[in-house]
Amino acid sequence: MSETHENAPLKHLALIMDGNGRWAKARGLPRTKGHEKGADTIRDITVYCANHPQIESVTYYAFSTENWKRPKLEVEFLMKLLDRYLQSELETYMHHNVRFMAIGNIEVFSKALQKRIDETQQKTQHNTALTQILALNYGGRAEILYAVNRLIANGKQEISEEALSKALQTPYSDIDLLIRTSGEERISNFLLWQISYAELFFTPTTWPDFTAKELDEIITQYKTRQRRFGGI
Ligand code: IPE
Ligand code: IPE
Ligand code: MG
């Protein structure tokens, strides 16, 4: 496992899980199979992160505010998969001391799914090795607007960077390292506020094929980067 580099702390890792559909298509399988395999990848990466000495939280982009544009059947499948995933993951969370949290507007999800999310958050709330955050019906712009409106509603006249950072849903808000799989090199409305000084990595590997080994290699490269934060 990689050593800490003074220059490159690694408290918060963010992952844009992309390429499930292409992984399936390349194998002549329905897109849903790619999503299923992708859920296994989340488990492997979370276990790696829970055992990593520096990583305190990992945020995965699971469903964007734009993903509602997909065919109804695919959206429904993703919702069912999420429910199944949380049900089966509880054991992993407890075994590896992982706290689960959701960000994004989950109020539009079915009552049953909201209940599953709430219960998983409650049952894992005292776990301390890692916080695993799933971004669900999440958009970076929506998150910022929601926080600003909440501050205004609470009577804030002038909003500081610190106040806004705290009002966001995402805990430990600054991202150190953002990785996107599948070769696309864009942000797609993910964590816009929190990535202002993140180091970005893009890998051609599709999400279902992404492994803890590849993540470890990326972290090794990340440690060699000079993060200057505007200094010299
Ligand atoms: C990422 O894989 C999963 C979600 C966005 C839910 P995609 O489903 O976007 O896979 P591609 O990009 O079509 O291959
Ligand atoms: C980004 O992937 C959203 C998630 C990973 C949940 P998309 O596949 O939806 O992004 P675009 O449409 O290619 O930008
Ligand atoms: Mg995609």
Image: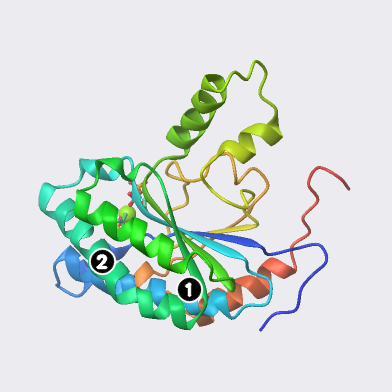
Q: Amino acid at mark 1?
A: Thr
Residue 166: horizontal and vertical position, in percent?
A: 63, 40
Q: Which residue is mark 1?
A: 46
**157 relative position to 64: left or right:** right
Tell me the crowding category of disc 2: few under 14, some 14 to 19, or many 20 or more residues within 10 angstroms, Cα based.
many
Question: Residue lying furthest right in this view?
Answer: 232
Residue 77: horizontal and vertical position, in percent?
A: 16, 59
| Sequence-first tag of 2 and 1 | 2
Query: Which of the image's four quarters has the N terminus?
Result: bottom right
Q: Establish whether ligand 1 lies closer than 8 Å to the Cβ of label 2.
A: yes
Residue 121: horizontal and vertical position, in percent?
A: 42, 60
Where residue 160 sits, quadrant-wise, is top right
Classify 191 as above or below 141: below
Q: Amino acid at mark 2?
A: His
Q: Nearer the viewer, residue 197 or 100?
A: 100
**202 relative position to 26: left or right:** right
Where residue 5 sits, quadrant-wise, is bottom right
| Residue 209 in sight from this viewpoint | no
Q: Nearer the viewer, residue 35 or 201?
A: 35
User: Which dot marks residue 103?
Assistant: none
Question: Residue lying furthest top in this view?
Answer: 157
Where residue 74 sits, quadrant-wise, is bottom left
Q: Residue at x 18, y 64 (%)?
A: 31
Classify 206 as above or below 214: above
Q: Are marks 2 and 1 in contact (CB under 8 Å)?
A: no
| Residue 5 in sight from this viewpoint | yes
